[in-house]
Image (cartoon, coloured by chain):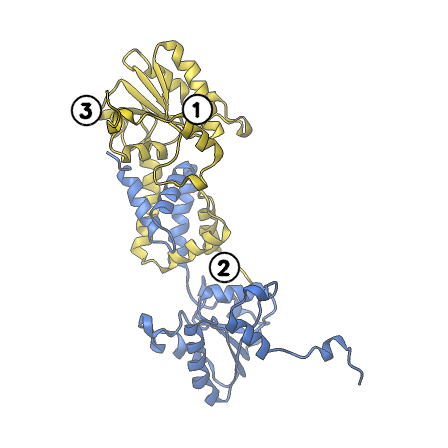
Chain colours: A blue, B yellow
Amino acid sequence: MAVYPEQIERLCDMFRRLDGIGRKTAMRLTLSVLDLPEEDVQAFSQALIAAKTEIGFCKCCQNISASELCPVCAAPGRDKSTICVVEDFRAAMALEKMNEYNGLYHVLHGVISPMKGIGPEKLKIRELISRLDGSVTEVILATNPTPEGETTAMYLSRLIAPLGVRVSRIANGMPVGGDLEYADEITLRRAIEGRYSMNQTNGATAE
Amino acid sequence: MAVYPEQIERLCDMFRRLDGIGRKTAMRLTLSVLDLPEEDVQAFSQALIAAKTEIGFCKCCQNISASELCPVCAAPGRDKSTICVVEDFRAAMALEKMNEYNGLYHVLHGVISPMKGIGPEKLKIRELISRLDGSVTEVILATNPTPEGETTAMYLSRLIAPLGVRVSRIANGMPVGGDLEYADEITLRRAIEGRYSMNQTNGATAE
């Protein structure tokens, strides 16, 4: 008799399919649905369907979008000569939040990972190459600084550089607010290698 | 432009209303909904509605139930002379899983908490008292061993004891598998106070 009613178990199973949700959390979420007012549950149910059916991918940059062209690609003020390549839309959103980058994006939908059987053909690389029609002068590779992200960046740089487009990679180093004591060796090595002169900045050096 | 499409934000807002879900987790769950097949999202949407509209409360013990009487109250084999009083249906379910208790339950739907403005009148206490019609010989108070749970147990014992019903409280002590090193003082004190003789158990003492 130690079972929840079938309707509860069914909802719990659905929550478990979401990223990072185990049995206990799924049951906690399920039971908290029971505490919501019925209108909210109705709205929740509709929001699920709307998010799934009305959201697609921008035909240009492959980012998630509710319209054929995403707001970034459709914006007239953006610098169309620069494309920042990211692994997924979460990364694109993080860069957009910085409110400083004015170019376009390209979302790969993953990284090359032989371990997971993901080769270049499974990523949106063809779509990226087709955008390099002469108007693009720089491609910034902003895949994550993980082994897979580095491999993907390396692969893309070899593919794109011969096309006469400038290819750059985001910098490695200490995160701002970080503590050297807790940084890993590779990050520290990159931070030293990538050091920049402060002479010009603080103007301390006489001419 | 650093915003997700409105459909994404709306779903994210719904996830945030669930117990223990903040903005970041809500967005992670929302984005993982996009990765599910459309049939699964449809099923999820329907499961939400079903859980909310088809689940009510047992008219006897106030536990969640898909029928007027919950399976425990409706079972002919249960001992109807004992009622175990719990704070919520999660606690009732935990006790049921133990597969040993054969009495009935009563779900209070909360505990007395002056801090949160919850007085006895907001709990299912009237429903509990109305069940004490002479056939019930023992009420086990199994509210959590927290200040609110203890207060509620104390309140109920004063209310029920004069009715000539035996009132008991679940034992406090070391959780099985626990480590004395990490136990708090109050638990240790209760464990010592509630110690039981092992003479009879292991039969080591000569008559």
Identify whether A197 is placed above or below B23: below
Q: Is residue A130 visible?
A: no
Quadrant for the N terminus of chain B, please. bottom right
In the rendered image, residue B117, in percent from the top left (x then y), is placed at: 53, 27
Is B42 placed left or right of B122 in the picture?
left
Q: Residue B77 — which label?
A: 3
Residue type at mark 1 is Leu
In the rendered image, residue B95, in percent from the top left (x then y), is placed at: 31, 32
In the rendered image, residue B182, in percent from the top left (x then y), is placed at: 45, 41
> Disc 2 marks which residue?
B4
> In which quadrant of the rendered view does residue A146 lie?
bottom left
The residue closer to the viewer here, A124 or B137, is: B137
Identify whether B15 is placed above or below A126: above
Residue type at mark 2 is Tyr
> Label 1 marks which chain's residue?
B
Residue visible at 50% across and 89% down? A164
Q: Residue B123 — which label?
A: 1
